[in-house]
Image (cartoon, rainbow, N blue to C red):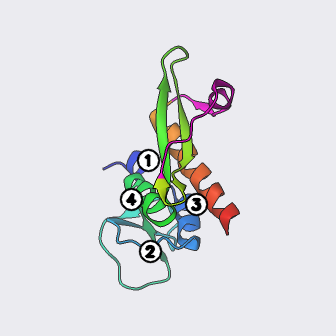
Amino acid sequence: MSVDKDFVPYQEALVLKELGFNEPCFGYYNSGVKNPLEVEYSIPYDHKEYLSAPLYQQAFRWFREKYNLRGFIGFRPNVKQFDHHIYDMLLSGIEYTKQRTMAEFNKDPLVGTYEEAELACLRKLIEIVKKMR
């Protein structure tokens, strides 16, 4: 596993905790050390210096299960960049995929790598949930 590619960054993990994320994780950030981005791979005792470090897949699953929000990462081959899409998938209890116009589609942020798109998507999901509260 790679800290940079697999785990949600420290700041976003902190916000997820504030939003109610409380799932078991493989790693924990130790905010008591100089570099809080170092992931501890052993489950710590109940200690205030530790923060759950979810994998991206755990965070995306949590948004699906708790808020019925799904994020999609797409690739635009004509510009060789990635983008992300957020859909609210609940309408009167029926799941659907919102149809968007090409103008709406083109407003999605473009990023260079899949990992950048994943982080941008996560941040957008966080923003949506904060507005819901």
SS at badge 1: helix
Quickly name the residue at label 2.
Answer: 22
In the image, what residue type sits under mark 3?
A: Gln
Structural distance between the alpha carbons of marks 1 and 4:
15 Å
- Between disc 3 and disc 1, whose residue precedes? 1
Q: Give the range drawn in magenta.
A: 95-112
Residue nearest the viewer, comparing 128 with 59 = 128
Q: Residue at x 55, y 39 (%)?
A: 85
SS at badge 3: helix
- Between disc 3 and disc 2, whose residue precedes? 3
Q: Within 10 angstroms of label 4, few (less than 14), some, or many (20 or more) residues?
A: some
Q: In which quarter of the image is residue 62?
A: bottom left
SS at badge 2: loop
In the image, what residue type sits under mark 2?
A: Asn
Q: Which residue is drawn at 35% across and 48% down?
A: 2
Quickly name the residue at label 3.
Answer: 11
